[in-house]
Amino acid sequence: MPAETHVGRTPLGPDEVLTLVRERLAAILEIEEDRVTLDARFADDLDADSLALIELVEELEEELGERTVGFRVDDEDLADLHTVREAVDYIVVRLAAADGATS
Amino acid sequence: MAGPPPTVAVDAMGGDRAPREIVAGALTAAEHLDVHVLLVGRIEELHPLLPDPLPSRVEIRDARDVIAMDDEPVSAVRKQRDSSILVCARAVRDGDADATVSAGNTGAITAAAVLRMKRFRGVPSPAIAVPIPVPGDHPQVLVDAGAVVAPSAERLVQFARMGAAYASARYGIDAPTIGLLSNGEEAGKGDELRKHTHELLLEEPGFVGNVEGRDFMHAGRADVIVTDGFTGNVALKSLEGALRSLASLVFDVLDATPEARAASKVVLPKLLEAAEIYDPEVTGGAVLLGVGGVCVISHGSSSGRAIENAVRVAAECVESDVVARMQEAVSRAG
């Protein structure tokens, strides 16, 4: 049984996280969503600079923080996220950790 | 009917002479101008600098963090969320202020503006507009003075559109002329970026072709001078250096002989009065183009006088609806 979040919603899985990342990143970079593939590299393929990634992180923290108390991206971890896949995997793990802490 | 006076959020902790000079300038602005001032910074450092009771047009907002001039900008705004720079930008986003002024870390101010005020749709990152004084005329607007080091030709066209809208709103120029900074007036001059940009700008109203470095500070050449942030910053600093050197030369000559010193008693007051337009303390600072709020960047060594003028510029930008006019120029062009 999934752990309870503070508003009783079920935690997001990898597909939903990808959808969210794709939607938000495409809006920030003003590109087509289908360019945001799992293998896309933020800098080399999507031309996303560090400020664009911070915009993404802040939007995800706001959106996901409403569902899962305590969800936050550690600043130290940001430098290690180079692709969409790495970001999605990271977020799923962090959501599970935050979810476990609040259940 | 005139609305309420604009509220300007002033970053009290930004700049080499913060908070003392910033607070002094903000207080003077609130006293002399039709503005409200929201002073943002560490409250315990601000209190000793403020009169009691606080003037009715001045408010204080606590911000615990201070981003240093040499902090890496993007990382600093991420880590120091309660910094005075971010709190100022947030005040504009939340409608508590109409504009912000900071003499702090330029990169951090830009990042905070992007994160809190948001970029215009279609504008990947903002540019910096700096007024270049022109004797006997309104200033020229230099875009970009350092924000986007390696833009594309399309971005330079965007700078031109925003710069023209800014010049029109700020200085009341009906149809601003636009020049592309290059190493020669002929269309074929310059590197590939300049040549491509020239082709694109031919479609823009007001484009007068290439201009050269010597066309700065001259009336009638171009109201808006467009270039990349790298070149713009080098050009700006070159002008500042040349003016400083020239001023030093004049003072040396006027102090060289007893006759010159006698003459200087007559000449110097007039010279200083005429030269005031070149004083960066008077111009009020640079303005960020392409974000959804008025953001004035004052130079790092700003005195109280510079901050007062920066607040004045911020208020004028609000009153002339600069942001909406730039946004319209960008969206109209598609």
Image: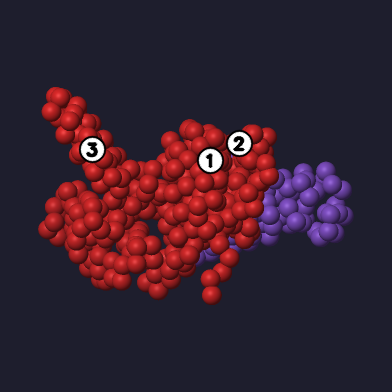
Chain colours: A purple, B red
Give the spatial CA distance, label 2 vs label 1: 8 Å
- Across the whole image, how many numbered discs are drawn on residues? 3
Q: Say whether residue B289 is left or right of residue A73.
A: left
In the image, what residue type sits under mark 2? Leu
Q: Residues within 10 Å of mark 2 (few under 14, many from 20)?
A: some
Q: Say whether residue B306 is left or right of residue B263.
A: right
Q: Say whether residue B74 is left or right of residue A98.
A: left
In the image, what residue type sits under mark 3? Leu
**From the viewer's perspective, is the residue at label 1 or at label 3 nearer?**
3
Residue position for label 2: B49
Give the spatial CA distance, label 1 vs label 3: 28 Å
Residue position for label 1: B24
Quarter of the view holding residue B40 = top right
N-term mark: 2 or 3: 2
| Element under disc 1 | helix
Q: Check residue B268 in the rendering and tell me which mark sits there, or answer none.
A: 3
Task: Name the spot of residue B38 as percent of width and height, x first.
Answer: 60, 50
Task: Name the spot of residue B188 as percent of width and height, x first.
Answer: 13, 58
Check whether the beta carbons of the residues at disc 2 and disc 1 lie within 8 A of each other. yes
N-term mark: 2 or 1: 1
